Image (cartoon, helix red, strand yellow):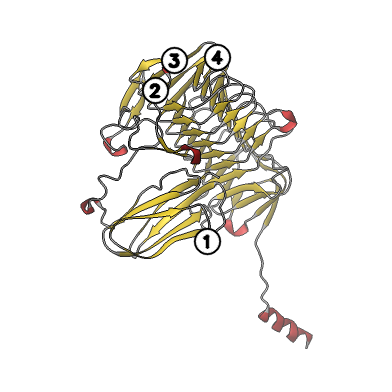
Amino acid sequence: MKTTIMILTMLIFPVISLAQTVVSGNQSGTWTAAGSPYLVTGEIVVPTGQLLAIEPGVEVNFQEHYKFTVNGDLQAVGSEADSIYFTTDDAATGWGGIRIDSDDVCTLSFCRIEYGKTSGDYPDIHGGGLALLTSNAVVSNCVFANNDATGEDNGMGGAIYAYSTTESIFTDCVFTENHAYGEGGAIKLSADNYSEFTNCHFIENDCLYGGGAVSGYMVDGTKFTSCLFADNYTMYASGGAIHTLGMGNTLFMINCTISGNSAVTGDGGGVFLAYGTGYFVNTIVYDNPGMHSDDVFLSIAGYAEAYYCDLDMSCGATGTSNFFEDPQYADPDNFDFNLLATSACIDTGIDFFVLGEDTLVNMTPDQYFGSAPDVGAFEYNDGSGIEDEGSLPQSGLVLNQNSPNPFNSSTAINFELYKDSHVSLTVYDLSGREIKTLANGERTSGLNSVVWNGSNNSGASVPTGTYIIRLQTESCSESVKAVLIN
């Protein structure tokens, strides 16, 4: 009789098992979504000659302040619908960050790295979220948020510390609210060569002693293309956004927007260059206050060349075709650095530019709107040229990039339909979870517009991060990425 009752109870109240995997020590092989979350209960090491692959949708949750050391190969490759999380439930204590010291080129894609905190001695004192120690990496579509390098009242590179790296690549990444005690609120580059940052956003990072977003020491050929630096600051030194020290620095800034950064007690609210040269092309450096000097400051052995830029040439830079005017951003207080139609930055950039042996700009007409590229990170588009039904693809659907992007309070999503259609417009997070249904019903042909205010289906505000906006009709779908900054 007792056996019968137990069987009936199991049928009526099914046992629900939540998968989780406890890990520590040496690791290799594959961490699967089916085994997630991975609960880290001790130091993690990927040994030399071994590979650890992490699947989309995996959460790596550190139960205490443990490091993730990679001496072999790490391939943490998420997807647009299913990101990989490196996190902890104890944000105050944090975890020890990912420390890569390897001959392999590791890959991080569609990952969120948050609440990493430094502690101990060198090199663990640097790089709250990620340290590249004579190692290279390819990092794309990742978010580094709320990482911290202030252990023992020391530390540089709130999100990333890179020492003696060569040709590391960062694409479509967001660095927000990272902090360092020393230099480089988001990133500290030391003896770094030819690293590239493309379409990256540095927002609200800070440090005490130079380079609110990025600090470079003896860096050569570091290139930033189509990057945004906004509301970063340094407290007791110079370079609210970018800062260099040491000998032989060379930095390239191509189609970047540097605004709203500050050096609270120092020089160069935007950029501080010492012992090196900065090259600026198609770039805005505007409204970056410093206590002693604004925007760009050239310190000892500092030199700059600027071409087709909106910046103050009184900084001592040389170059041609520059101007200094209000860029006329749409809403900078809410992180909307798109240009208004009356901006002097529209159609005043250059599409091909060679400096010495380096081709810094090589854009084709399909990469910009109007007669020439715009100055800054965001190309102005008034919508002309897309309203003609004949220009629509065979699918009969065009989903435009939301604007502004990144955004703070609200963003507009415009899409075009060739014919009347039933559409579903939905916001997802990077793990594929539905956040907000913006539209679900019939829409007429032509241009349609919907506004998202950063809330979920319950009306609550969602956190800072990258989200997917997907438009679905009966026959096809398109999606764009939206960056929300709270």
**Judging from the image, what secondary structure is the residue with disc 1 in?**
loop
Tell me which label, 3 or 2, sits earlier in the chain. Answer: 3
Q: Residues within 10 Å of mark 4 (few under 14, many from 20)?
A: some
Q: Which residue is mark 3?
A: 314
Label 4, label 2: how far apart the Cα atoms are: 30 Å
Q: Which residue is mark 1?
A: 457
Evaluate whether residue 5 shows in this view.
Answer: yes
Tell me which label, 3 or 1, sits earlier in the chain. Answer: 3
- State the image quarter where residue 126 is shown: top right
Name which residue type carries label 4: Met
Residue 305 position within the rendered picture, expressed as x and y whole percent measured from the top left: 41, 17
Q: Is residue 196 left or right of residue 382?
A: right
Q: Which residue is mark 2?
A: 324
**Judging from the image, what secondary structure is the residue with disc 2 in?**
loop
- Could you tell me if the residues under marks 3 and 2 are in contact, i.e. CB atoms within 8 Å? no
> Looking at the image, is mark 1 or mark 2 nearer the viewer?
2
Tell me which label, 1 or 2, sits earlier in the chain. Answer: 2
Pick the residue in front: 427 or 6. Answer: 427
Q: Residues within 10 Å of mark 3 (few under 14, many from 20)?
A: few
